[in-house]
Amino acid sequence: MRHYLFLILLLILVPTVYSQEVFITDEASQADFVIYITEDTSDADWVILKTDWRHQAMEGKWFFTDWQNDADLVLCITADKFKADKIVFYTQWSTAIIFEWKED
């Protein structure tokens, strides 16, 4: 009986898990967003936590991948703040994450 309960919980929870694997491209036309990285949290549209572990990636926690096909989000980083779609600040605290992006 416990095995069935585990399977049911797994089927319910798996679709709610949201990976956030990010690929950085040099081509703005290939990117979902062009971002500018800021040092000031008050300027940021998104406050993101970088993770070194793929299994920890979720909405607002980014794992950077070397493969575009694996990525949930493709970004192009710009040095010009006014060309950016979103301004990003990297935090060290998961409680500080501010991130909202929904696929259409």
Image: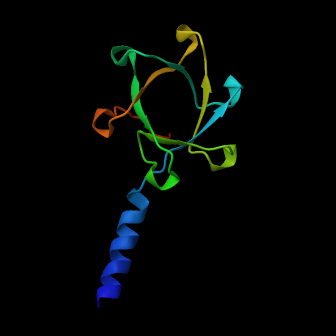
Q: How many marks?
A: 0
As drawn, is 32 to the left or to the right of 16?
right
Q: Residue at x 48, y 21 (%)?
A: 86
Q: Residue at x 34, y 31 (%)?
A: 98
Q: Is residue 89 above or below residue 20?
A: above
Q: Quadrant of the N terminus?
A: bottom left
Report whether 97 appears left or right of 35. left
Q: Is residue 73 left or right of residue 26?
A: left
Quadrant of res 26 = top right
Camera-side residue of 66 and 92: 92
Query: Which residue is depicted at the point 41% across and 43% down?
Result: 59
* Residue 73: x %, y % from top left: 56, 39
Residue 5: x and y, percent? 30, 81
Colour setting: rainbow
Residue beneath the point at 54% across and 16% down: 84
Task: Tell me where residue 100 appears, x and y as whole percent.
Answer: 39, 34
86 w.r.t. 97: above or below: above
Closer to us: 88 or 100: 88
> Residue 95 at x, y = what percent?
27, 37
Quarter-of-image position of residue 60: top left
Q: Residue furthest bottom?
A: 1
